[in-house]
Image (cartoon, rainbow, N blue to C red):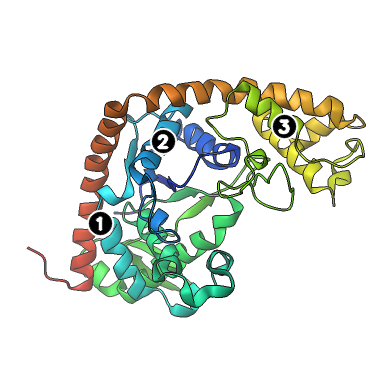
């Protein structure tokens, strides 16, 4: 092999309702990427138990995320859609990566610090090792690109560190088995089995904030339903939430720099830009100097136009449980075939006996 085949991988946790931030920051990008790349999209149900072990309806949440993928336009025939736990090689490679990664690397992960809080001694080991499993999710398919939000960039950097260390530690063996791609590691050339996966980050709203507090990320776990637009919201709910969104008393600025220190205004401008597929500059050019009493209704109308059809299709697909299960079953079989080949190579590289 002279190079790694381009491949996109990404996943979404089945925890709570999907919201506008998930759609703009991830799912809509997934749909666009399938036009130019081979893609594998995963409902990462193993990740969902790292912070909360017991769920009321994890199967239902998994099916809901799958329905959102399909309703948004992901084609499960041309690409792969499945749930993570269906492919055991994710967990197997994660254990090997636990032995590759260093404890110091994990302790530096800011998401662990945020989620564990002050009671980090009581956090699960799975939460600490979460990034190692994420690396396995990506590299068990030797994916070359991952669409990520700003909050996941550090985890992808760790994935690259794990891949680089594995490649460096086993360079000679990889070369002997004829499984590698020549790669630069500093001043040296090594035989790399895993690619150094690149992030795909673009668009004006890679990080969508709460409608009630522009300094906090839009979240499924926020106790206020007014803080987010759920993908299952109907037109009336979408319009109501935008009109009730927190703002300041000043009109929108005439220049982009005027959004500085105005987090709620900046968030709403970013959402409008993302939904209309324009830039923040174009939104300011159109609405600069106008009050929120003008801008909010325009944003609400746009959001209803873009999101209401997705919500309706998601409800339709969710009602057909047999279809959703068939998509996951087929995707799991296809993903498993790729993952099995990778793990056979990894076992040979490490020296684990295999039949």
Q: Which residue is mark 1?
A: 89
Q: Which residue is mark 2?
A: 64
Identify the mark at residue 242; answer none if there is no mark.
3
Alpha carbon distance from label 3 to label 2: 24 Å
Residue visible at 29% across and 51% down? 85
Res. 278 visible in picture: no
Residue visible at 39% across and 72% down? 165
> Which mark is in front, 2 or 1?
2
N-terminal label among 2 and 1:
2
- Toward the left, the furthest residue is 355
- Residue 280 quadrant: top right
Identify the mark at residue 57; answer none if there is no mark.
none
Please tell me which residue lies in front, 201 or 72: 72
Residue visible at 62% across and 22% down? 235
N-terminal label among 3 and 2:
2
* Left or right, residue 164 beside residue 245: left
Please tell me which residue lies in front, 242 or 142: 242
Alpha carbon distance from label 3 to label 1: 43 Å
Secondary structure state at the residue bearing disc 1: helix
Res. 279 visible in picture: yes
Tell me if mark 2 has few (under 14), some (14-19) or many (20+) residues whose alpha carbon lies within 10 angstroms of its own. Answer: many
Work out which quarter of the rendered image holds the N terminus and state it.
bottom left
Secondary structure state at the residue bearing disc 2: helix
Residue visible at 88% across and 32% down? 288
Work out which quarter of the rendered image holds the C terminus and state it.
bottom left
N-terminal label among 3 and 1:
1
Alpha carbon distance from label 2 to label 1: 24 Å
> Which mark is in front, 3 or 1?
3
- List x then y, in percent, for residue 289: 93, 32
Q: Is residue 253 above or below residue 142?
A: above
Please tell me which residue lies in front, 287 or 222: 222
């Amino acid at each position: 092999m002279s190079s790694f085949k381009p491949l996109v991988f990404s996943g979404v946790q089945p925890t709570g309702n999907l919201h506008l931030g998930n759609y703009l920051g991830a799912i809509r990008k997934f749909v666009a990427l399938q036009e130019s790349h081979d893609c594998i999209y995963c409902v990462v149900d193993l990740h969902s138990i790292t912070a909360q072990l017991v769920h009321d309806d994890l199967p239902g949440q998994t099916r809901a995320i799958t329905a959102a993928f399909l309703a948004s336009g992901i084609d499960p025939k041309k690409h792969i859609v499945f749930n993570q736990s269906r492919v055991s090689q994710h967990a197997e490679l994660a254990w090997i990566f636990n032995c590759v990664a260093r404890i110091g690397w994990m302790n530096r992960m800011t998401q662990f610090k945020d989620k564990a809080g002050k009671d980090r001694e009581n956090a699960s080991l799975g939460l600490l090792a979460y990034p190692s499993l994420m690396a396995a999710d990506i590299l068990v398919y030797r994916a070359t690109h991952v669409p990520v939000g700003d909050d996941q960039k550090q985890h992808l950097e760790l994935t690259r560190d794990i891949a680089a260390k594995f490649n460096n530690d086993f360079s000679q063996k990889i070369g002997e088995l004829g499984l590698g791609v020549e790669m630069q590691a500093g001043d040296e050339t090594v035989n790399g089995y895993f690619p150094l996966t690149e992030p795909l980050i673009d668009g004006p709203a890679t990080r969508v904030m709460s409608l009630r507090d522009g300094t906090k990320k839009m979240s499924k776990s926020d106790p206020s339903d007014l803080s987010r637009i759920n993908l299952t919201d109907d037109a009336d709910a979408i319009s109501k939430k935008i009109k009730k969104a927190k703002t300041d008393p000043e009109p929108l600025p005439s220049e982009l720099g005027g959004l500085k220190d105005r987090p709620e205004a900046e968030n709403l401008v970013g959402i409008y830009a993302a939904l209309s597929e324009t830039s923040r500059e174009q939104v300011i050019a159109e609405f600069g100097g106008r009050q929120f009493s003008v801008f909010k209704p325009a944003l609400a109308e746009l959001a209803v136009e873009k999101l209401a059809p997705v919500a309706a299709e998601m409800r339709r697909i969710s009602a057909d449980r047999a279809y959703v299960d068939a998509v996951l079953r087929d995707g799991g079989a296809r993903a498993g075939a790729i993952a099995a080949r990778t793990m056979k190579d990894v076992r040979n590289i490490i020296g684990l006996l295999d039949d």
